[in-house]
Image (cartoon, helix red, strand yellow):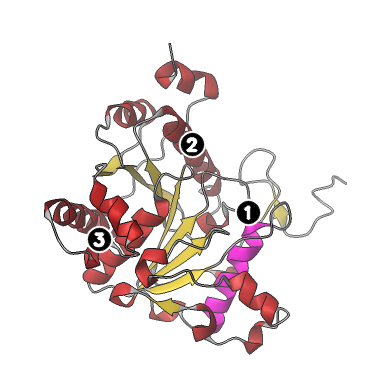
Amino acid sequence: MSPRDEIPNLRGQDGEGSVQVHLDPSMKIENTMVFSVYGKGGIGKSTTSSNLSAAFASMGKRVLQIGCDPKHDSTFTLTGRLQPTVIDILKDVDFHAEELRPEDYVSIGWGGVKCVEAGGPPAGTGCGGYVVGQTVKLLKQHHLLEETDVVIFDVLGDVVCGGFAAPLQHADRAVIVTANDFDSIYAMNRIIAAVQAKSANYKVRLAGCIANRSKDTDEVDRFCDRVGFKRIGHMPDVDAIRRSRLKKKTLFEMDADEDILACRKEYLRLANALLTGAEVPMPTPLPDREIFELLGFD
């Protein structure tokens, strides 16, 4: 008997060598559209997620955003403050989840967006997948997912280990935030591979990528053409986005100027495209050597 056979509920179909725990069927998120946002660390996933949440809310959708990062700042611009994490709150009640009420871990942000910060395990211990699982379990127990049209998971960095790939088990579509540089595109290539592995057993498919804080998109587009991927959005490197973060606001509640109006328009277009867009064909990620040859330094 192999070590994998001795461990219950583990399977190998999520990619070669995988020993990932399959999703408990009772924890499926149903009757709502679920997006997971991934990308290189510091690329602007939280800014993108929060402005997409605000855009969906502006369209009349009931939105829930779940931050999956120990920094717990995913929903910062929606609520104007850092909120405690689900894991910290569970610690306070000695992990007796039955003692919690929705208002203990859910804040209401701009446009009525429900905001949850799942947090993460202490450094060097635990698993991000457990954190995501406990958060979804609480939301299900309190029937909060039944009152939601759109869920956005804002996921830590480009970490695609089993723990932080856990939101892909819930998602309908994965969105990758990138920039027009080698490191961001290299991370995107790895995330594509992670989604490809998860799609063998789950409904998740790729929605496309968003070029963020980038004047040009030539390198992103060159990569997409090579692997059969699609760029679905482009947020230019404008100071309005930086200022909105400093003011603890999404672009949708900032005093409007020409740049802010243009960014709002792009986020609204993108939100509509995500809701109505067709499935993007699964691209083929490049081996490391080939991505260096395509985009690497001379």
Residue carrying label 3: 251
Separation of marks 1 and 2 at Cα, in angstroms:
17 Å
> Mark 2 or mark 3: which comes first in sequence?
2
**What label does residue 26 carry, if any?**
none
Any part of residue 22 in sight: no
Under mark 2, the amino acid is Ala
Q: Is residue 139 magenta?
A: yes
When the figure is inspected, residue 51 is found, relative to residue 216, above or below; the finding is below
In x, y percent, where is residue 292?
A: 48, 19
When the figure is inspected, residue 57 is found, relative to residue 264, above or below; the finding is below
Residue toward you, 245 or 195: 245
The answer to whether 113 appears left or right of 285 in the picture is left
Q: What is the magenta segment's predominant secondary structure? A: helix
Q: Are marks 2 and 3 in contact (CB under 8 Å)?
A: no
Separation of marks 2 and 3 at Cα, in angstroms:
27 Å
> Residue extending furthest left?
258
When the figure is inspected, residue 28 is found, relative to residue 43, above or below; the finding is below
Residue carrying label 2: 187
When the figure is inspected, residue 125 is found, relative to residue 17, above or below; the finding is below
Look at 48% across and 78% down and name the residue there: 106
Q: Secondary structure at mark 2?
A: helix
Q: Quick one: label 1, few (<14), some, or many (20+) residues within 10 Å?
A: some
Q: Magenta residues? A: 127-142
Q: Is residue 197 magenta?
A: no
In x, y percent, where is residue 130?
A: 66, 63
Q: Secondary structure at mark 3?
A: helix
Hey, which quadrant is residue 184 in on the image? top left
Q: Are marks 3 and 1 in contact (CB under 8 Å)?
A: no
